[in-house]
Amino acid sequence: MSLDTLANVKLRLGITSSADDSLLGALQDSADAWITEHCQRDFGGGTFTEYHRGGAILFLRNFPVQSVTSVKADAGYGFAASTVVPATAYVMHLERGVIVSLFGAFAPRELAGVPPWSWSPRTVQVVYSTATSAVPADLRQAYALLVGHWYRHVKTMVASSYQNVTQQTFGDATAIFSKDQIAGLPMPPDIFRLLAPHRVPNL
């Protein structure tokens, strides 16, 4: 699911023609993947199944969280119905997607029969949901800026016939391309500033 519609991206970029809709759509696909990887979050919303180590605090990748379907702790990785952690055993901070156990680790290493590798990345399974069609406005602006950044580079390369030239003259008109522009220019800093509040913190 794209972070925004083609019509909204074109509106933000001031593009009124439909001649490059296919190109813009392809760039949207790339921008969706780039922002998801950069922020380590899926902003499209929906239902997610994640696996975490068996500590006392779990940080879900996607937030805000609408609801938690289940939390299961199983060192054997089976996650049968008998491994469900009751909702009374933890507190859910929906806004930041944090689950805090009220009774110690979800899979404490000191329990009899629990192997020392019980804190591996797949000891706890969490199934939860986030809202769909709820992409923040500032993130949609960063998305449009990213699409526009790549779009301008493609149009520049087309105008220069994909040649390493810095100036072309057509009749009375002269087009001048800087070397940085031909190379693609650095990513606009506004993109990173707009995305910064939405990145998953490195812990």
Image (cartoon, rainbow, N blue to C red):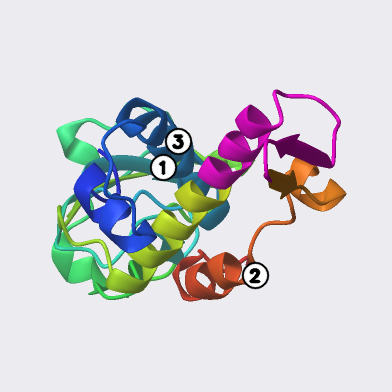
- Judging by the rendered image, the residue that carries numbered circle 1 is 32
Judged from this view, the residue extending furthest toward the front is 172
Residue 13 location, quadrant = bottom left
Q: Answer above or below: position of 11 versus 18.
A: below
Q: Is 47 on the left-hand or right-hand side of 146?
A: left
Q: Position of residue 147 (x, y in %)?
A: 46, 47
Mark with earlier residue (1, 3): 3
Q: In which quarter of the image is the C terminus?
A: bottom right
Residue 189's label in the rendered image is 2
Marks 1 and 2, how far apart at CA:
18 Å
* Residue neighbourhood size for the residue with mark 3, other residues' Cα within 10 Å, grouped as few (<14), some (14–19), many (≥20): some
In the foreground, 50 or 179: 179
Question: Which mark is nearer the camera, 1 or 2?
Answer: 2
Marks 2 and 3, how far apart at CA:
19 Å
The reply to whether residue 64 is visible in this rendering is yes
Residue 75's label in the rendered image is none
Q: Answer above or below: position of 80 versus 127.
A: above
In the foreground, 15 or 60: 15
Q: Where is residue 16 in the image (x, y as percent from the top left)?
A: 27, 49
SS label for mark 1? helix
Residue range in magenta is 150-172
Mark with earlier residue (2, 3): 3
Q: Is 59 on the left-hand or right-hand side of 5?
A: right
Residue 2 location, quadrant = top left
Q: Quadrant of the N terminus?
A: top left
SS label for mark 3? helix
Question: Which mark is nearer the camera, 1 or 3?
Answer: 3
Q: What residue type is labelled 3?
A: Leu
The residue sitting at 56% across, 46% down in the picture is 152
